[in-house]
């Protein structure tokens, strides 16, 4: 699939221009849940974050620009209310889960989680495409991963083309 479109480049540039904030991190007590896990904002952005993360690691080389774009997207999605440290903790968890389950199994799980909301499935796919293009090169493995996302998220080829060419 051809994801190098003007719309995806604009989204990528926007995400790269919104780095995650350096907010203070409050340390929970030993009996408190992981800071990211229990928050409403975490539950809201987690499927988007994991989708982008899986695209980022698909080629085995999560580059600096892809990582910056991912953090920028999370900054936008959380309205800057979550510190970089907490975002990195979430990404570490995603890495462990992807290593344990495999990328395709994680995508299938996310597709099931997002199945009820077409807008969310499409948003996650579009954000994933922007991450793949963050370093100006879409690796074949990233493209394959986006294909799996499209399939598991129930996005038709026709709708995918529209998403890649226009961002509402």
Image (cartoon, helix red, strand yellow):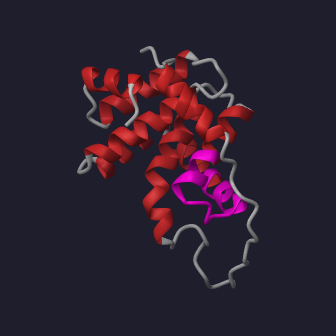
Q: Position of residue 119 (x, y in %)?
A: 30, 45
Count of numbered marks: 0
Quadrant in the picture for residue 30: bottom right
Q: Which residues are magenta?
A: 72-91
**Quadrant location of the N terminus?**
top left
The residue lying at 55 percent from left, 29 percent from top is 10
- Say left or right for 163 vs 58: left
Q: Report whether residue 104 is seen.
A: no
Please, what is the dominant secondary structure of the magenta stretch? helix
Residue 132 in the figure: left or right of residue 114? right
Asked if residue 109 is positioned above or below residue 27 in the image, the reply reads: above
Residue 118 against residue 32 in the figure, above or below: above
Quadrant of the rendered structure where residue 15 is?
top right
In this view, 25 is above or below 156: below
- Residue 43 vertical placement versus 88 (above, below): below
Determine the residue positioned at 48% across, 55% down. 46
- Between 161 and 89, the one lying in front of the other is 161
Q: Is residue 111 left or right of residue 128?
A: left
Q: Is residue 47 visible?
A: yes
Percent position of residue 37, x then y? 53, 68
Residue 113 placement (x, y as % from top left): 32, 52
């Amino acid at each position: 699939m051809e994801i190098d479109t003007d719309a995806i480049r604009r989204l990528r540039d926007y995400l790269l221009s919104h780095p995650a904030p350096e907010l203070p991190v409050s340390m929970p007590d030993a009996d408190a849940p992981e800071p990211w896990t229990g928050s409403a904002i975490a539950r809201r952005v987690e499927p988007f974050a994991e989708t982008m993360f899986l695209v980022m690691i698909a080629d085995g080389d999560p580059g600096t620009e892809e990582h910056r774009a991912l953090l920028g997207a999370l900054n936008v999605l959380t309205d800057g209310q979550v510190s970089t440290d907490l975002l990195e903790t979430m990404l570490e968890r995603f890495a462990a889960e992807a290593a344990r389950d495999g990328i395709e199994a994680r995508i299938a799980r996310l597709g099931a989680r997002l199945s009820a909301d077409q807008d969310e499935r499409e948003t996650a796919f579009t954000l994933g495409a922007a991450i793949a293009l963050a370093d100006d090169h879409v690796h074949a493995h990233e493209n394959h991963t986006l294909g799996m996302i499209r399939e598991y998220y129930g996005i038709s080829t026709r709708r995918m083309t529209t998403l890649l060419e226009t961002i509402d």
